[in-house]
Amino acid sequence: MSRYLPRLLLLCLLVIGSALPVLADGIIIPFEPDDPMPRRVIFRPPEPDQGFTVPLSVTRHRVKVEIKDMAASTKVDQAFYNHLNRTIEGLYIFPLPVGASISGFAMDIDGKMTKGELLDADKARGIYEDIVRQMRDPGLLEFMGTGLFKTRIYPIEGLKEKQVKIEYQEALKTEGNLIRYVYPLNIDRFTQEPMKDVSIEIRITSKTPITTIYSPTHSVSIKKHGDHEATIGFEADTVRPDKDFVLYYAVSQKDLSISLLTHRPDPTEDGTFLLMLSPRSELQQKQAPAIDVALVMDTSGSMAGPKMDQARKALEYCVNALQKGSRLYLVSFATEVDVYKTEPQEMTDQLRQGALEYIKRLEPVGGTNISEALLRAIQALKKQGSDRPAFIVFVTDGKPTAGLTEPNEILREVKKANDGRIRLFTFGVGDQLNAPLLDQLAEENGGTSDYVGESEDIEAKVSTLFAKLTHPVMTDPSLEIRNVEVAQIYPQKVPDIFKGTNLMIAGRYRKPGDALVSLTGKIDGQPVKLDYEVTFPERETENGFVARIWATRKIGYLLEQIRKSGPDQELKDEIVRLAKRYGILTPYTSFLVLEDKEIRGPNLRRAMIPEDAVGVAPSPAFEEAKARFSADGLRNKQEGADAVDASMEVQAMKSAAAPAPNMAPGGSPTVGGFSGRLRAAQGEPGRILQAPPTKAVGERTFYLIDGKWVDSLVTDDKAPFVIKAYSEAYFALLAKYPTIGKFLAVGDRVVLVVDGRTVEISPDAGITEKSDLF
């Protein structure tokens, strides 16, 4: 935790939903009850080399929300603990979001209803500024420009809990068919101890069918009860939440809904967008259509042991899950290829039993003939000549040693044999395999690739995939956007849409305007065309995560190009630019940043390499890591554990559905759930590469470099303007540019771009009087 974060606040969370940004945190400002006016805030200055001490902690926070046709009712049950051994008084303030329509606000403290005062934004501004000045902490600046509800809480007895319940109603707003609900959970800096009990339960009912449900910030449970009702849950225990909870849901009468999120803070630059496609529950609950499936399993000698047992269980699940009417083709391969039946057979009880017996008899022996096994499966499925969806599930733990052994030859022959109708999904077991080959086989044949370690449960991953494959909603989809120029779209080809899918398509757009989105494909084998009208706005300052998702996906595709064709300076420059601007520091992007000799933007090199590695010969451990994670290493690693790691990271980035979390001090480069293997190459003592702490604030990324939070948009070596924190000039700057409040709230040592100019905020020195500089 940085010492520049607020030192004295307890955030008693309240929830509110809106299509606008919401930062409606309830905050307790502690005072001595007998202090004369103006009262002084209670605090204990931080000890050297220790974090700050706040007198209060949130111990329980439970929220229940009912949303009925966009009318939200929120109930909050919370408790906070006074760590001081004396009674204190608290000023409770609840910042109101801009443009929110709140009614029925009620507060219950220890069973007694409490009245409060509502203040408009102008009156609230004075309270915010007074608290920031006295505390010399900028945390409340994110609320500047909002009104507030305030009330007195007394007594807050020492070494005891205070129970608070809050209830209020709000009319949510909609943009297109998308409704946004935001819960202020960014309280890490407001509580002395981790929160022990956090839960959010949201129940949505809607007359219009509910389709997409998506949280870009948290992992949530989603349960739909038909088309018109859904329950969303989030639970955590002993945590320090560091970001607000955001939930989107869409309503639509169409079988497949499309929802649009955009981000374009600067109208002179291209905007980014995120299209979300989701089928209605009613469509998903139809009887699963008949499909053709080929299960292709590696039985070479290297599969002996636990891997073989896992692979058997995975195939057994698939056979049991396949419904009657669908066709099964079962292939095993080692040096030679063997099949259970010469042609795909319609599933019957007898066929199912025979296939399970065949799987049990399989023994690992021989080489790995990947080419013949895949070609046999493709030819068998093509012979059926039907419009049914057709899939191959391919499981292997090795690299080709029999039949065609050159990867390019295998790719060419498989692509030539497949007519484009058959989707190929690959699973690599262990790390002694050719990962780029499996990736390309899947990508070029409309599927996906995945990997499991020898100790991981392959059955779980295969069963998750197969559950989707048996319930296709739309096959052969194609998307066209007219009347607005779009580019750099990821994924570059729209994949099939399955039950439970929330398909996300990220891209860039040039000029704003109304657009027509046409989605074509096949539902139940019949051609379908669906048209949607959406609007790409000229300016949209919210949804900064959309740009981060797009940038993460693009970096994934660029890394894949380097892996296929080798490092290209233009590709590396673009990766460095995106990685630094959006804070996407993975092991691979980090080493590209280190190679950036021009130091475009913040000098991350100084923050990423420990002091003992600067100006001296690199250590063997550093050279080893560089060989693994540099652009050349990415291209050269085709087989083994490093190749599998690279595949996992690239695939995670290409399919990113949420931005990477903020990097805390001491963190390692990571993205999309890929933990990175950098630690394995670090050796002793200490780290050889350290990603700097980062904070994503709206569309900006801030890096902690030399004790200052530096905006990724900064290009000056030295800021031409230095303003003293908490001075008249400081608040004058904020008054002229109120949108920078959320940026200033990251700390009192900040370097950022304001209206095209670099400004440094420092508590030590700088301009104090209001001037005409801005």
Image (cartoon, rainbow, N blue to C red):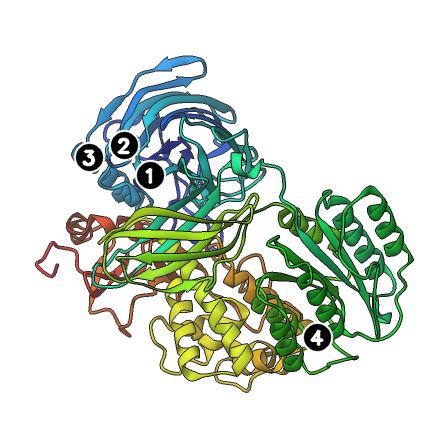
Name the amino acid, label 1: Val
Q: Which mark is residue 100?
A: 2
Depth order, front residue of 411/555: 411
- In the rendered structure, are the residues bearing label 4 and label 1 in contact, judged by CB atoms less than 8 Å apart? no
Residue extending farthest to the left is: 772
- In the rendered structure, are the residues bearing label 2 and label 4 in contact, judged by CB atoms less than 8 Å apart? no
Depth order, front residue of 214/632: 214
Q: Is residue 154 left or right of residue 346?
A: left
> Residue 355 at x, y = what percent?
84, 52
Against 269, is 103 above or below?
above
Answer with mark 2 or mark 1, whichever residue precedes in sequence.
1
The residue where tag 4 is placed is: 640
- Can residue 750 be seen here? The reply is yes
Answer with mark 4 or mark 3, whichever residue precedes in sequence.
3
Mark pair 2, 1: CA separation: 9 Å
Mark 2 element type: loop
Q: Which mark is residue 121?
A: 3
Name the amino acid, label 3: Ala
Name the amino acid, label 2: Ala
> Residue 721 at x, y = what percent?
19, 65
> Residue 501 at x, y = what percent?
53, 47
